[in-house]
Amino acid sequence: MPSETPVSIVQQLALHGYNADRDAVTVLSRTDEPQLAVEAVVEAIDDDVLRITVEDVRSILETDPVSDPPQLSPASTEAVQPTDSPVETKGVTARSTSERSDRVTEANPKSDQGYVNPTGDSSDRSLGNSSDHSPGNSSDHSPGNSSDHSPGNSSDRSPRDSSQRSLSITNDMTGRSTGTGEYKEFVRTFRDRYERLSKLLKTRVNHRPATAIETMPGGSEAEMIGLVNDIRSTKSGHWLIELEDTTGTFPCLITKDKPIAELVAELLLDECVAVQGRLSDDAGILFVDSLHVPDVPRTYRPSTADRHVQAALISDVHVGSQEFMAEAWHRFTDWLHTDEAQHVEYLLICGDMVEGVGVYPNQDEELDIIDIYEQYEQFAEYLKEVPGDLDIVMIPGNHDAVRLAEPQPGFDEELRSIMDVHDPKIVSNPATVTIENVSILMYHGISLDEVIAELPEDKASYDEPHKAMYQLLKKRHVAPQYGGRNRLAPETKDYLVIDSIPDIFHTGHVHKLGWGKYHNVLAVNSGCWQAQTDFQRSVNIDPDSGYAPIVDLDTLDMTVRKFV
């Protein structure tokens, strides 16, 4: 059988609205006629089946009266091996790098447990194609009254065992803010950034301070680590980069004929880099031969949980908006109450719990709830639908009622008291949560706008937000550029530096679904729960709404479930 057969089978089953166990796909792929085998299974399987099992397949193929049963090969019980081919199931396209072996499925529209597509459209809708990704009828995502919705009965699933859980938070700056906005505090923050990131680069170069390089004779070899203070092109098409360390600045030239010249397009102001090269004859400029960024080592190996346990990663709920997708949220929380979701023990919400007030021009015209506290009260009502035995972690976003400058402290006591449903862990943006050995960096993602605006489209785009996240991992900083779209609050330390490499990097903000692995770090932007607003339409934002990435913490494989 050709290697793409399992992928083709997954696609065919998905087109009919079914998911299947890996062993079931293996059995189908090992038959003499996989296409006929799939057709036989789809024809015979009960409509209320959530997932086709290997037992279902064997039973149907052995008893099918319509046609001769396809013969199984002796190897039919082997597990399907991961494939690098893109796998598309209904509404979701696997668009990550070839490093990813993630699985992509959706809530079964044939189920009787509240997963029916509210638009009634079962056709494929590939992400990134605005004509195929319509928000649907507004009546399907009106906020409604959550009190009218009864969450799934807890008897639908086995009780979750919390005895083996472990959860800890690091880099939470809530309650530790000391900045007053004075100039000297910004200097302190950038000095801290430089000192911590330069440590990551000193193993690659023999750094000399800017003032020391100024005293070296012309023609000398020199190496320097600095923050990018300026980038400009010369009349000849070369690149002049000014680097700054704690002693001063020094100009560095990257000629257009050097292979590293293409790396200049990825540089952002204020990020930390290292260069190696030779001084000009007059020692006034450093001709760069190599350029390094802090980066994640290619040899990095992530930690995993010691048991099969899952985390749901969501963001940008936007309760209070007229376009909040309440029905999709109900389907998601209903699913969490089913036995199929019994291994989901953690829910991580990456900012923008509510729509907020006065965030963008004429926002009041698009609000269903105009009072910010009432928005949080309504969000708390929706949170009640989540099973009470989940551990919940939340960070704020730019629509939330916290300061806009990053790092953003967690919510104040009044808002915490409103959102105390299920006793969630409310921490700052960004923060790192370690769940059963797995380190997850949670960052709302405002800087993604900056990265996407500044870098070439093949390096960062809204259609593939995970690639912009790769850039932040390379730079080991979640918001490297200061003074543009991203506001920075000066603190005693730069809380935005990525000191420790996360196993999972989770963001939101851009309302686009995207994921992939960068040097074995799983990067996930989890989309949103808000249909397209008039404002989003005016700025060409076509959101990916109603999706819930589910990560297996024991393998770091990921499933994307769709609830629209």
Image: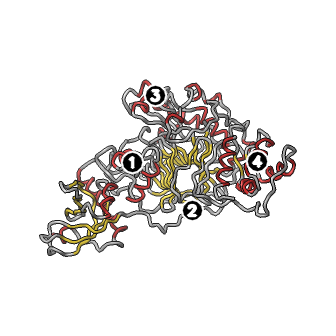
- Residue type indicated by callout 1: Glu
The residue at the point 44 percent across, 52 percent down is 467
Task: Please tell me whether mark 2 sits on a helix, a strand or a loop.
Answer: loop
Q: Which mark is residue 36?
A: 4
User: Mark 4 or 2 closer to N-term?
Assistant: 4
Task: Please tell me whether mark 3 sits on a helix, a strand or a loop.
Answer: loop
Residue 478 appears in view: yes
Dot 3: within a 10 Å radius of its alpha carbon, few (fewer than 14), some, or many (20 or more) residues? few
User: Mark 3 or 4 closer to N-term?
Assistant: 4
Residue 323: image location, x then y, percent: 51, 30
Disc 1 to disc 2, C-alpha distance? 35 Å
Position above or below: 50 against 1: above
- Left/right placement of residue 15 relative to residue 180 reads right
Disc 4 to disc 1, C-alpha distance? 43 Å
Residue 189 appears in view: no
Dot 4: within a 10 Å radius of its alpha carbon, few (fewer than 14), some, or many (20 or more) residues? some
Residue that label 3 marks: 371
Task: Determine whether label 3 and label 4 are within 8 Å by CB.
Answer: no
Toward the viewer: 219 or 372? 219
Position above or below: 551 against 212: above
Residue 531: image location, x then y, percent: 51, 33
Q: Which mark is residue 437?
A: 2
Residue 331: image location, x then y, percent: 64, 37
Toward the viewer: 486 or 118? 118
Position above or below: 523 against 222: above
Task: Determine whether label 1 and label 2 are within 8 Å by CB.
Answer: no
Dot 2: within a 10 Å radius of its alpha carbon, few (fewer than 14), some, or many (20 or more) residues? some
Residue that label 1 marks: 457
The residue at the point 39 percent across, 48 percent down is 457
